[in-house]
């Protein structure tokens, strides 16, 4: 039994290419399974979260992060009586469009693609699931349901206002070309919020990202446990662990602290969302979309705690000299490869030369961008070494 305001599979708006339903799997379960079996999902195993693969096997990748997001999201969805399959599908797919080398790779590719419409990982996720995955006989992409596509594009909220002007993360840059082109043929209601399931997936991303970056940062010795004492929420969790287990070894202290951190954020989402539901009393999934504010949310205090935690991680981890140095070199890999492919299409694999000739500059650039964005860290480094006989991360 799921809530009235949840996304009900039998009421789905369906797929662009109609398909017969299967008795033992809902349409949302099939979406999740197609995502798991996609090539883009497999490639996440060697895409950077914060650390490049050579720095250790125990740090998180985009794949392990996505699995952790899915675990948190499914737990929240079950308690809130939402559709677990749709929630899990969105959690598993949310990072499909990321480049190699994390946000550093995305920033560099966006800069290189600026004359051709830029690069955005959410828009790239949409391109992957609607176009770039090519394995099914009857369609390109994965032919996902409307609800899954909607959740991927606007899981953080509306991206245009009532008059169609870009807002939120796209207020300054405008909507990515991939989203604009897609919604002309398939309306995803960009001015409304997404489903409660999509909102759960977005918050689960925040929960997993913050908690596990604390974990990875400590294990990488970018900062020390003592540095967390004054960080709200983390400091309390750490204090509780040290009080309960004063002689516990460091590795266990870290794990117990991260456990408590995740539990506190999950509990906050459930409590605040419960209050929101009681107040709003939504009767349908569309009522959730039309509320004008998120139904699933952190409390104001938890949002502030997360802001402070992000500020700490930004200064102590993401902008740590060790991380910045390796990411600066990684950006050079993206830049060198982009310029090489743009100047000589014969350097691209044969199956990537079919769509647009090099003379069609804008479309060819997008093709090069698709190729680069799909690379794993390891493959990008191998390609760079092949073309330049240089390993830029280690020389």
Image: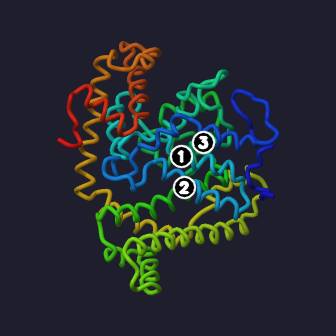
Left or right of residue 252, residue 227 in this image: left
Name the residue: 35% across, 66% down: 218
Query: Which residue is disc 3 drawn over?
Result: 190
| Image quadrant assignment for residue 152 | top right
Q: Residue at x 50, y 41 (%)?
A: 96
Instruction: Name the side, left or right, on which 39 lies relative to 358.
Output: right
CA separation in Å, label 2 and label 1: 9 Å
In the image, is residue 96 above or below residue 140? below
| The N terminus - image quarter | bottom right
Rounded to the nearest angstrom, the CA distance separating label 1 from label 3 is: 17 Å
Give the labeled residue for mark 2.
69
Looking at the rendered image, the disc whose residue lies closer to the viewer, 2 or 1, is: 2
Mark 2 in CB contact with mark 1 (< 8 angstroms): yes
User: Looking at the figure, which quarter contains the C terminus?
Assistant: top left
Q: Residue at x 25, y 31 (%)?
A: 385
- Camera-side residue: 129 or 41? 41
Residue 181: assigned label: none
Q: Which residue occupies the foreground of this view, 167 or 44? A: 44
Give the residue number, with chain letter if any, for mark 1: 94
Residue 265, located in which quarter of the rendered image? bottom right
Give coordinates of residue 4: x percent, y percent.
79, 56
Q: Position of residue 289 (x, y in %)?
A: 68, 51
Residue at the left extreme of this rendering? 395
For marks 2 and 1 on the same chain, the one whose residue lies earlier in the sequence: 2
Mark 1 or mark 3, earlier in chain: 1
Relative to residue 29, is residue 78 depicted above or below? below
């Amino acid at each position: 039994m799921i809530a009235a305001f949840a996304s009900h599979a039998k009421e789905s708006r369906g797929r662009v290419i109609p398909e017969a339903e299967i008795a033992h799997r809902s349409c949302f379960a099939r979406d999740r399974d197609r995502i798991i079996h996609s090539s883009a999902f497999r490639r996440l195993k060697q895409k950077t979260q914060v650390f490049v693969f050579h720095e250790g096997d125990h740090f998180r990748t985009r794949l392990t992060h996505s699995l952790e997001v899915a675990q948190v999201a499914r737990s929240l969805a079950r308690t809130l009586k939402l559709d677990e399959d749709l929630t899990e599908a969105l959690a598993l797919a949310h990072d499909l469009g990321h480049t190699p080398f994390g946000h550093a790779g995305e920033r560099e590719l966006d800069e290189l693609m600026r004359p051709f419409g830029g690069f955005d990982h959410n828009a790239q996720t949409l391109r992957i699931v609607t176009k770039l995955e090519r394995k099914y006989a009857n369609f390109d992409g994965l032919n996902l349901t409307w609800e899954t596509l909607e959740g991927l594009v606007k899981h953080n909220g509306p991206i245009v206002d009532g008059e169609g002007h870009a807002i939120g993360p796209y207020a300054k840059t405008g909507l990515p070309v991939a989203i604009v082109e897609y919604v002309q043929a398939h309306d995803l209601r960009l001015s409304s919020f997404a489903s409660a399931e999509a909102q759960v997936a977005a918050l689960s991303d925040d929960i997993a990202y913050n908690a596990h970056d604390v974990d990875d940062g400590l294990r990488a010795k970018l900062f020390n446990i003592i540095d967390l004492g004054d960080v709200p929420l983390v400091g309390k969790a750490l204090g509780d662990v040290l009080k309960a287990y004063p002689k516990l070894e460091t590795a266990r202290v870290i794990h117990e602290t991260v456990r408590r951190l995740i539990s506190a954020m999950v509990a906050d989402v459930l409590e605040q969302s419960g209050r929101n539901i009681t107040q709003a009393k939504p009767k349908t999934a569309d009522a959730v979309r039309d509320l004008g504010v998120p139904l699933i949310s952190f409390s104001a205090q938890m949002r502030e705690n997360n802001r402070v935690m992000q500020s700490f991680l930004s200064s102590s981890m993401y902008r740590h000299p060790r991380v910045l140095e390796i990411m600066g070199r990684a950006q050079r890999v993206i830049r060198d490869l982009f310029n090489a492919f743009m100047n000589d299409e014969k350097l691209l694999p044969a199956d990537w030369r079919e769509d647009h000739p090099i003379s069609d500059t804008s479309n060819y650039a997008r093709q090069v961008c698709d190729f680069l964005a799909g690379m794993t860290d390891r493959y990008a480094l191998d390609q760079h070494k092949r073309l330049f006989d240089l390993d830029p991360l280690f020389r």
